[in-house]
Image (tube, rainbow, N blue to C red):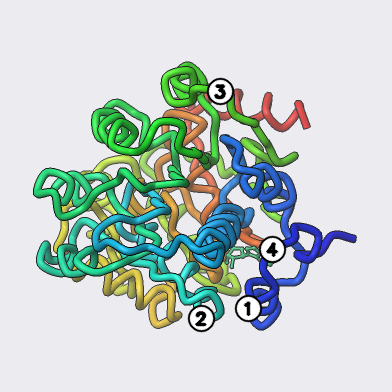
Amino acid sequence: MSSFHQFSLLSSLVKSLSEQGFTRPTDIQVRAIPPLMEGKGVVGVAETGSGKTLAYVLPMLHCLKVLETEGAPVSEPGRPRGLVLVPGRELGAQVGKVFKSLTHGTRLRVRTVLGGTKKQIARQNVAGNLEILVATPGRLLQLLDSRELRLDDVRMLIMDEADRLLDAGFLPVADRVLSSCPRGVQIGMLSATFPQTLQGLLADVYDVPPVVVRTKGSGRMLATLTTDNRALSKGARFELLREVLNETVDGGTLLFANTRRQCEAVAEWLDDEGILYGRYMGEMDRRERTRNLERFRDGELDLLLATDLGGRGIDIDRIARVVNVHLPGDVDTYLHRAGRTARAGRPGVVVNFVTHRDEGLMQKLRKREQRK
Ligand code: AMP
């Protein structure tokens, strides 16, 4: 049986883990922690909810603490040694929390610079000495431009949700970050999927080919996830939604539509029906969005209506059901949405409203299942 003792991590880290009830590493942790501890470049492909955050948080804390105790403490402000790049602020906040839950033993300083927070706060966060920085691309660039932050002492760079960080929108930033880090910096990429585009970019990112680790379930559905496909007849979407929402589940429900317009239509229907819910969409007041997410997390709200922004990186254990009121066009988006439920071994269901237009997606999903 595996345990966290097998990695020769600092004992203070293993102790903090067990205090939080973590005794056995998950599959991705077993696979990714050893090569990261050895200083190798790693690409980890793991389904969402598989414990991929700790898979890099632990090696980073361990390696940077060892560096410090070996007589090389951080001595200059704004010069982190560990950098975690994330595509969105919610994911960044979660990653920051995971780090902080483990740092009282090591006393390493973890700071965040995330989009959506005041620039002044981001500046303050890097104004002092720090070991680890968790950052979203936009904010990071601003601080690099103003030279308040330097990446020339970074020893370990992690790109979480690397498939998103390396897509067309973020690619120039990722490029800039890479060129601001020292040559040969250790790079870890974590991604729920491993699309061709990402595979093609590896040679640009890594000088030496990375160790690629995949969990058995990567890119497939989680074992505790049940799929419930409902055929949708024309004009009956809201009738079906009413039927589904009347079926109670033990936990929260996340509703997805593809476009803002579709979301607005669902919102209008929920309002008309007098159903309590929160919105979680791109183009809305950020504070309200965060508040809605918190209320959903705390169980004050049982229903959250989201566009795909909500489908990424959100780690809320109490999501028992994901409803695709409108199914997405591609498999990756589907997997990301479905991965919001059935996390860390808990049961979850994904309910799909299926029309003839979704046949292409359903066929691809069936093929994936058969490959199991
Ligand atoms: P992640 O994939 O990093 O978002 O983690 C998903 C969930 O799994 C989080 O709620 C973690 O707290 C939990 N988790 C991570 N590692 C372990 C572990 N070794 N044992 C039990 N739960 C874990």
Residue hosting label 3: 208
The residue lying at 52 percent from left, 21 percent from top is 199
| Position of residue 347 in the picture relative to residue 158 (left or right) | right
Badge 1 or badge 4: first in the primary sequence: 4
Question: Would you say the residues marked 4 and 3 are in contact, meaning their CB atoms lie under 8 Å apart?
Answer: no
Asked whether 111 or 339 is in front, the reply is: 111
Q: CA distance from mark 3 to mark 1?
A: 34 Å
Q: CA distance from mark 4 to mark 3?
A: 25 Å
The residue lying at 67 percent from left, 68 percent from top is 10
Q: Amino acid at mark 1?
A: Ser
Quadrant position of the N terminus in the picture: bottom right
Residue hosting label 4: 9
Q: CA distance from mark 1 to mark 4?
A: 11 Å
Q: Nearer the viewer, mark 1 or mark 2?
A: 2
Q: Amino acid at mark 2?
A: His
The mark found on residue 130 in the picture is: none
Question: Residue 8's x, y, as percent?
Answer: 74, 61
Q: Amino acid at mark 3?
A: Val
The mark found on residue 16 in the picture is: 1
Circle 4: element type: loop
